Amino acid sequence: VCMWLVLVAVVLVSALVALGFADYLRVYFPQLNQLPVALSLVGLFCIINIVGTRASIISQSAMTVVFLLAMAVFIAAALLEVELTNLIPFMPAGLDGMMMAVVPAYIAWTGVTVLIEIGGEIKDPAKNVPRALMIGFIIVVVFYISVCIALVGVVPWDTLGQYDAPVVAVAERVLPGWVVNFITLSALLASATSLNSLMLAYPRDVYAMSRQGLFPALLGKLSGVHAVPANAVIVVSIFIAMAIMMGGAITDYASMAVMAILLVQVVLAVAVTRIPRVMPEQYSVSSFRLSGTTIRVSAVVVTLSSLGLVIGAAIDDPAKGLFLVGLTVVGSAYYALRVRYLARSRV
């Protein structure tokens, strides 16, 4: 059920970043229709990820370098033009408004953990995964907070909300035209790298679930010289395309995805506290592990904060909460039926 919710979140997040890409591309080509652009981007990365992991990683690395360079230029120029009065009051919509904004904004901070999904394809994962997570999170904190301050510091928050491409709107005020084009390109790459990483990582979960027998065997097959789960990539891509064609707003996709991720975190927090007791041998020989006290404290903090955000979001928009409950019921029913089918088939 956790993986079911994760895949729901991934499909919704992929849809929103593809639509975000289309919004920024329309800065160059205003006449473009958003849906065909978003669908084409999904199709492109579907092909890239079928070709092989190496092709996806190379394109991801190149896009990320350009993106970070452009964002550094934007941040440096915009921070020099910040009007401190734009940051006062710090929470103009009050604490309730801030908490409602935290839910969709949270989606931007969760991507760093995507690295774990391809841990089995990383050299020396016990050392390199924790190291990369820490380095990645520090970069995210510095860049994301700096961009937020730069945006709101140059253009008042209530005016900024009227733009489909806010980074470009601010860049046009603080940078020459040719640099603005570079910044727009970086915004496109931000969406592209997010979508590519999701479409690289999470079909592996579909593949793994198939190998466990919980999804049809067709999704557990590897293809090509690079042994890529091509069928899983195609199926995930189809669902992303379906979500795009639903025509929802980006904030709606983000809120529902975050609620799903937060519910997953609650279940995982409970599960991880059981590892030292239920799996003592694996825990004792693990090359990377936290102490029992650290696990328990972390689990309590994660559970309380996640449940608080889910409840707040559901109260603010009951329709989204009911939608997520419905999907959870569907996933639970599928699981029960699948297990019964496997038992009858003696699998």
Image: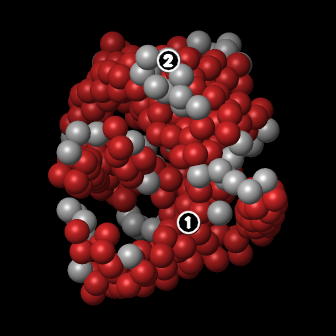
Q: Residue at x 40, y 26 (%)?
A: 53
Q: Residue at x 59, y 56 (%)?
A: 3
Front residue of 238/83: it is 238
- Can residue 78 be seen in this snapshot? no
What is the CA distance from the residue labelled 1 to the residue labelled 2?
33 Å
Q: Is residue 112 left or right of residue 28?
A: left
Q: Amino acid at mark 1?
A: Val
The secondary structure type at the circle numbered 1 is helix
Determine whether, in the image, residue 347 is placed left or right of residue 77: right
Q: Which residue was labeled with disc 1?
A: 264
In the image, residue 102 sits, relative to residue 296, either above or below, namely above
The picture places residue 163, in percent across and down from the top left corner, at: 56, 37
Residue underneath mark 2: 224
Q: Residue at x 60, y 37 (%)?
A: 220
The disc at residue 85 is none
Q: Position of residue 275 (x, y in %)?
A: 39, 77
